Amino acid sequence: MSTLVAQKQLAALIASALEQIIDQGMLNISDLPEINLEIPRDKSHGDFASNIALVLAKPAGKKPREIAEMIVENIDDQKFIDKVDIAGPGFINFFLSDQWLYNVLERIEAEKLDYGSSNFGAGEKVLLEFVSANPVGPMNIVNARAAAIGDTLARLFKASGYFVATEYYVNDAGVQTEIFGKSLLSRYRQINNPDYPFPDDGYPGDYIVDLAHELLNQNTALDWMTEDEQIEFCRTWGIDRMVDSQRQDLLDFNVKFDRWFRERELHQAKALENIIKILTERGYIYEAEGAKWFRSTAFGDDKDRVIIKNDGTYTYVTADIAYHYDKLKRGFTKLIDLLGPDHHGYIGRMKAAVQALGYSEDTLEILILQYVALLRDGQQVKMSKRAGEFITLKELLAEVGKDAARYFFIMRSLDSHLDFDLTLAAEQSSENPVYYIQYAHARICSIIRQAGAQSIAVKSVKDVSLQLLNHETEIDLMKKLAELPEEILLSTIERAPHRIARYALDLASLFHSFYTHCYIIGEKEELRDARLVLISCVRIVLERVLTLLGVSAPERM
């Protein structure tokens, strides 16, 4: 039984008690409100508390404490509930028997790394698009935060019963790619002619120089082409190399996309022309000032959007609409885009486009990430000398490693500004949260190895005396284990992977407290065996949540 199941069972018992009271004519209310139960901060107030009596007081015309007393008198349960108290003006505090916690251990042993999963999503097809950085430079820290959060969200959606696919949209057909091609050609020419001019709006990073040397070493027939052909070759060849580099950086970050969608595929398939035709037929395209406009204000956007400029070229909005239509045609019923902090204006136009195409506004959900600031020794890190921009993902991984990087990016809500402390992330101490969590997992593995060395096996939950697990730290651990299914579900529903990061840290802290107060291998056999089962379940759940975060669960540290 999980915390969520316990809450539902208690709510059902309360509802049943209320129905009896109503049938007896002791309470006159037409509709029962939702019965909420919360976990009290003060342990002395029980395992769960409900304010239902206070909610019903006004419509029933009775004092809340009087209603609470009637509810308590009519609750019928001999095994699940140990004690019920009424506190203050009418709060009902429930103290459960420890058996529900022992049931949690049985469930963890049975489900192992699937513990906490549910079928809440009922297989709904969700397409999660994230990162989608321009392919004209290396991954930066904003891209890295999007990658960590997006990948963790995908893992949470899968755990919550959704069919989820992940996608990276490569903007390889825009003006920025032409500038990139010119920048690469210029650096290529400068290898033998240092005075060759560099574009005023070119990309200055040293990675362009590296690409130019790689291009030279391939002995291409570049010099035999016209200038326009040279620029086009450098554009396509260089973009492909950058995409390969970005893909590898993300793999090193434990992020693997189901599909890399190239914008040029849309152009080759005439998808932009098709989307304009569809929107025109639906009456949402008009001409003004020599351009074609999408009437997005019909769906609440703050202004209409240009689709084809007066020079006949498409705007980026056109390709974005065509891309989202392609997603929908593939059968996805929920599209989630994870975008950077400068994309707030994107929301209205794209939601308008989805509606103009005949879909519900809620079909598209856009999540906006906030900025990241890197700190080292308390000082903000400004620029990367190597990349000519903010520090790259590759540089970050070299300094702090994949696990710390992912955890630090996830540990704050995505709509919160993040100060990433490089010094702390690189530390191997209890001050570093990801090290602290991983050390809890490794410590449990060490205890189990020590037991094995003494021919002590971890028994099945059914073969130990779980009632011996009654120390305060043991109860706290089991209660925290019971919370995971609800945490996974809420993290999914609220798009809040930081909840799992916090849960992992809390669980590790409770384990370290337990280990400080309770012996294991040195205890009497029955208690030793029960505690080995408990820490084995803690280990499983720690691995489970670290895997959801895309962080490794080391057995030795």
Image (cartoon, rainbow, N blue to C red):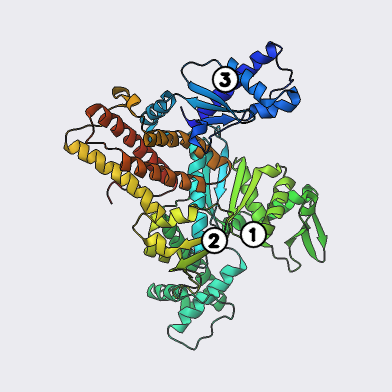
Given this view, does label 3 or label 1 mark the residue nearer the observer?
3
Q: Secondary structure at mark 3?
A: helix
Residue sitting nearer the eye, 180 or 164? 164
Given this view, does label 2 or label 1 mark the residue nearer the observer?
1
- The residue at which mark 1 appears reads as 343
- The residue at which mark 3 appears reads as 13
> In the rendered structure, which disc, 3 or 1, sits on the residue that comes first in sequence?
3
Q: Of the residues shown, which amino acid type is indicated by label 2?
A: Ala
Residue 547 visible to an observer of this rendering: no
Residue sitting nearer the eye, 305 or 83? 83
**How far from the left and from the top, in percent, is residue 542?**
38, 42
Q: Is residue 64 left or right of residue 286?
A: left
**How far from the left and from the top, in percent, is residue 200?**
59, 81
Residue farthest top in this picture: 24
Q: Secondary structure at mark 1?
A: loop
Q: Secondary structure at mark 2?
A: loop
- Residue 133 numbered mark, or none: 2
- Residue 239 numbered mark, or none: none
> In the rendered structure, which disc, 2 or 3, sits on the residue that comes first in sequence?
3
Q: Is residue 218 left or right of residue 67?
A: left
Q: Of the residues shown, which amino acid type is indicated by label 1?
A: His
What is the spatial separation of the Cα atoms under label 3 and label 1, in whole angstroms? 48 Å
Residue sitting nearer the eye, 465 or 457? 465
What is the spatial separation of the Cα atoms under label 2 and label 1, in whole angstroms? 13 Å
What is the spatial separation of the Cα atoms under label 2 and label 3, in whole angstroms? 52 Å
Query: Mark 1: few, some, or many residues within 10 Å (few <14, many ≥20)?
Result: few
Q: Are marks 2 and 3 in contact (CB under 8 Å)?
A: no
**How far from the left and from the top, in percent, is residue 274?**
69, 52
Q: Is residue 380 left or right of residue 369?
A: left
Q: Image quarter for residue 38?
A: top right
